[in-house]
Amino acid sequence: MRQMRKATRQKDAEWALDVFDRAPYVTVSMTRPDGTPYGVPLSVVRKDDSVFYFHCAGEGEKLDCIGANPIVSLSAVSKCAPRYEEDKNNFTEYYHSAVAIGRAEIVCDDAEKIEALRLLCIRFLPKYMDHFDEAIARSLGRTTVVRITLTEPPVGKSKP
């Protein structure tokens, strides 16, 4: 029974990761230094089953939040279809969603930064990869990359 639950959790985690991969953006929620919540939709890319990346400027609210408390929550919706079901006289929403908890940290290693930025460009602008090296040479020094390492398996929900 225990092994069956583990296999089910692993399948659920894989399904949730697929939701993150399909979502047009991921909302990353953080805690401001004063303790209030801060959530922002970001272009996020997944490297593997536990590592996500996003990029930002070298200063700002996201980095202030991470500096105060590196624990973040990710949430994504890859399908959203409101429906009226006439046969049931019912309003409903069909969706695929996922959430995860992780620890955010600024990437300092240039090779990892370049890898993360390459993954972001491949995901969001694959037709322009022939310009990637030039853009990296011009802007790597002023671009901040944040790594989010999941601290527990992601979970997902759906209403097909």
Image (cartoon, grey):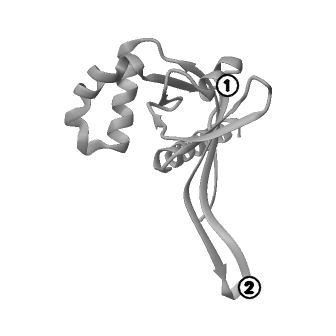
Verify CB contact (< 8 Å) between mark 1 and mark 2: no
Dot 2 surroundings within 10 Å: few (below 14), some, or many (20 or more)? Answer: few
Amino acid on which disc 1 is placed: Cys
Q: Nearer the viewer, residue 34 or 26?
A: 34
Q: Position of residue 147 (x, y in %)?
A: 52, 24
User: Residue 89 has which mark?
Assistant: 2
- SS for tag 2? loop
Dot 1 surroundings within 10 Å: few (below 14), some, or many (20 or more)? Answer: many
Residue at the farthest left position = 130
User: Residue 65 has which mark?
Assistant: 1
Q: Nearer the viewer, residue 58 or 44?
A: 58
Q: Residue at x 27, y 20 (%)?
A: 137
Instruction: State whether residue 33 is above or below residue 9.
Output: above
Q: Residue at x 29, y 22 (%)?
A: 138
Q: Nearer the viewer, residue 160 or 41?
A: 41
Instruction: State whether residue 92 is above or below residue 78.
Output: below
The label nearer to you, 1 versus 2, is 1
Residue at the farthest top position = 109
Q: Residue at x 65, y 17 (%)?
A: 67
